[in-house]
Image (spheres, rainbow, N blue to C red):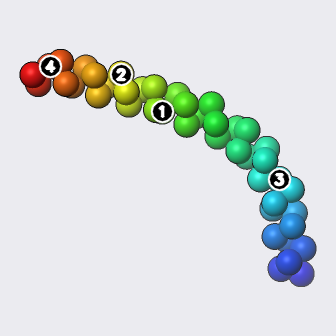
Amino acid sequence: MAALMVVENLNVFPYYLDGFIPVIKTIVSFFSVYYKFFIEVLS
């Protein structure tokens, strides 16, 4: 029963990954922009 649920989760996982990749890219670009901004302000 548990093994079947794991297999189902693995089948759904690529869809979650597709949804997360744009979010991760957006967060990373946000952080890089803020990082450059803070470096310029602090220096």
Pointer 2 or 1: first along the chain: 1
Q: Amino acid type of disc 4?
A: Val
Q: Residue 27 carries which label?
A: 1
Q: Earlier in the sequence, mark 1 or mark 4?
A: 1
Location of mark 3 (residue): 12
Q: Is mark 3 on a helix, strand or loop?
A: helix
Q: Position of residue 25 (x, y in %)?
A: 55, 31
Q: Residue at left 31%, top 25%?
A: 34
- Classify 10 Å Cα crowding around label 1: few (below 14), some (14-19), many (20 and above): few
Q: Which residue is drawn at 71% across and 44% down?
A: 17
Horizontal and vertical percent for residue 41? 14, 19
Drawn side of residue 3 relative to residue 37, left or right: right
**43 versus 17 height, above or below:** above
Left or right: 28 with respect to 14? left
Question: In the image, is 1 to the left or to the right of 21?
Answer: right
Residue drawn at x 48%, y 33% is: 27
The residue beneath circle 2 is 33
Helix or strand or loop: what does disc 1 sit on? helix
**In the rendered image, which residue does mark 4 sit on?**
41
Residue displayed at 79% across by 44% down: 15
